[in-house]
Image (spheres, grey):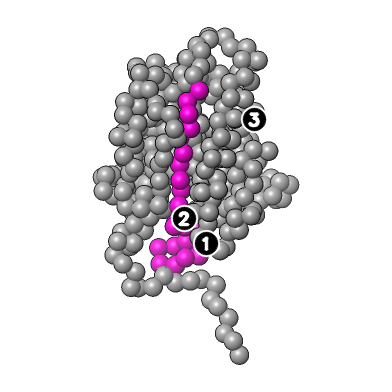
Amino acid sequence: MERSKPRVRVAPMNVPFERRRQTAAVFIWLASLPFTLFVTRKWWTSRRIYAKTTLLEMQADLDPTKNYVFGYHPHGVISVGAWTNFATEANNCSKLFPGIKFHLLTLASNFNIPLYRDYIMAQGCASVSRQSCENILKGGPGSSIIIVVGGAGESLNAHPGHYDLTLKKRLGFIKLAIRNGASLCPIFSFGENDIWEQVPNDQGTPVWKLQKHMQKMLGFTLPLFHGRGVFNYDIGMMPHRRPIVTIVGKPIPVEQNDNPTEEEILSYQKKYIEELYDIWNKYCDVHVSQILPDPEINPEEYTSILP
């Protein structure tokens, strides 16, 4: 009689030390607070190698004399690609974009948590409030912000093999760019949604209703996700070892206007979406095939990046 395969695959003990070190880097990163004692460039590099996180620049260089409003897509569960690439030097971001001072934005409520506030500020993070954004953009040449546009709502759609972006009604970041005369620039990370699985939460299900109610009451919500463990491949909170490839799009010049019209905002949104499509069409065939070495994810399940 054929023996059934165990549900949980235990990691072998003879795994090379380097892979154990990479796993440890991510485990400590998820613990957040203790990790403040180990913020070194070499450690962050181990975290990058763990998930094979790659940062690529697309065609146009960024002018360090200008300011930028970057939109990051997709949100994923906790925006690992954005954090690794732009809040650390894991991929030598400062050398790839000399003169550009990136500020990854997060919820203002995160700055009310003792110690954690200092941790994220040490990584150059700032509040996503309007006042905070404008203060950064007025901070001189190269001072720029990265907004994870989809927010909490989009995180609920972060299922492996799918890119459902929350974008068409998100006009605030475009209006912000116009008011400050900052160039708009989309960023897209292939693989961001693939490193964790979520509990099925299709629209209308009890799980979905609970998550949306939490978002309405608290301003944020929590995806019910799982990945792998430190010593197994199927149960735990660690992300799977699946690559994230981040593409920085071409900047869109924006003319400063203190009171932009709706027509003007929608015009820039159209250009922004076109640039997102350009990234997708140019890199999808290459990086989707690289992101899916695991047969559990079917490449044919990948959907259009926009509805």
Q: Residue 56: image x %, image y %?
A: 41, 40
Task: Identify which amino acid the numbered label 1 is placed on.
Answer: Asp
Quarter location, residue 150: top right
> Residue at the location (54% across, 40% down)?
282
| Residue 227 located within the stretch drawn in magenta | yes
Is residue 282 left or right of 55 when viewed as pictured? right
First in sequence, mark 1 or 3: give its number. 3
The crowding category of the residue bearing disc 1, from other C-alpha atoms within 10 Å (few below 14, some 14 to 19, many at least 20), is few
Query: The magenta stretch spans which residues?
Result: 223-252
- Residue extending furthest toward the top: 258
Q: CA distance from mark 1 to mark 2?
A: 8 Å
What is the spatial separation of the Cα atoms under label 2 and label 3, in whole angstroms?
A: 29 Å
Query: Picture coordinates of residue 260 (x, y %)?
Result: 58, 12
Q: Main secondary structure of the magenta part?
A: loop
In the picture, the disc for residue 246 is none
- Residue designated by label 3: 168
- Please name the residue shown 53% across and 37% down the image: 279
What's the residue type where badge 3 is placed? Answer: Lys
The quadrant of the rendering that contains the C terminus is: top right
The disc placed on residue 294 is 1
Residue 8 screen position, x and y as percent: 51, 71
Number of residues whose C-alpha sits closer than 10 Å to that of mark 3, classed few (under 14), some (14–19) or many (20 or more):
few
Q: Is residue 229 visible?
A: yes
Give me the residue at 44% from left, 32% from top: 59
Residue that mark 2 sits on: 242
